[in-house]
Amino acid sequence: MKKIRYLLLFVLIVTFFSISIILKNMEDSTILSNANTLSNKKIGWGIKRNNNHEQPDLGSENIKILTENHGIAIGNSESKKIYLTFDEGYEAGYTPEILKVLKQNRVKAAFFITAHFVNTEPDLVKEMIDEGHIVGNHTINHKSMPDLNSEQIKSEVMRFASNNL
């Protein structure tokens, strides 16, 4: 009986320390930010295409911002992976065909959709989700975020989520 008590005590102590370590690691991996302290400087986002089939040049300012924020715009040039993303802010009627081709080739993609797209194409949005694609929030009106104040940005993002999910 005494051995069982010691064993239970040992298991409880190990469990307690394990949970403490897990919680500590979760705290360390959380990055909090205050939107009011972030820059809203508008920069041109684009890529400079190369004629030699090399990865395009993102520009030094974009690379600096991506690096500082742990962002990814272009993957590893040694890897044979392609990431497909679609901006549904200005959808021109190609989405059904895109979804068809993706399905035929068993390829997943990410679609960033606006509230207008959700409201006018709910069946396509459902198809995206049902077929395992990532569906991201591209705001209510597809506005340029640096032109908005913090409350407007919050409204653009959060109203989309509350009205459309």
Image (cartoon, rainbow, N blue to C red):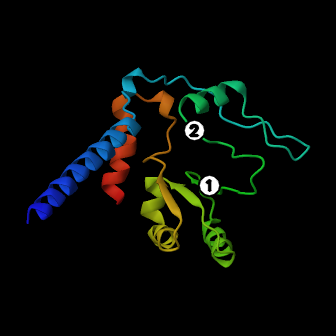
Three-letter residue code for mark 1: Thr
Which residue lies under the disc numbered 1?
85
Q: Quadrant of residue 65?
A: top right
Residue 110, given in percent of the width and then of the height, sits at 57, 58
Residue at the location (48% across, 67% down)? 125
Three-letter residue code for mark 2: Gly
Residue at the location (91% across, 44% down)? 52
Q: Quadrant of residue 81?
A: bottom right
SS at badge 2? loop
Residue at the location (54% across, 22% down)? 41
Residue 113, given in percent of the width and then of the height, sits at 50, 55
Give 143 or 129, whichever is nearer the viewer. Answer: 129
Residue at the location (35% across, 52% down)? 161
- Considering every residue shown, the one lying at the far bottom of the view is 104
Q: Nearer the viewer, mark 2 or mark 1?
A: 2
- Considering every residue shown, the one lying at the far right of the view is 52
Give 95 or 104, whichever is nearer the viewer. Answer: 104
Which residue lies under the disc numbered 2?
71
Residue 104 sits above or below residue 45 on the image? below
Residue 50, given in percent of the width and then of the height, sits at 86, 40
Report the Cα–Cα distance between label 2 and label 1: 15 Å
SS at badge 1? strand
- Considering every residue shown, the one lying at the far left of the view is 1
Q: Quadrant of the N terminus?
A: bottom left
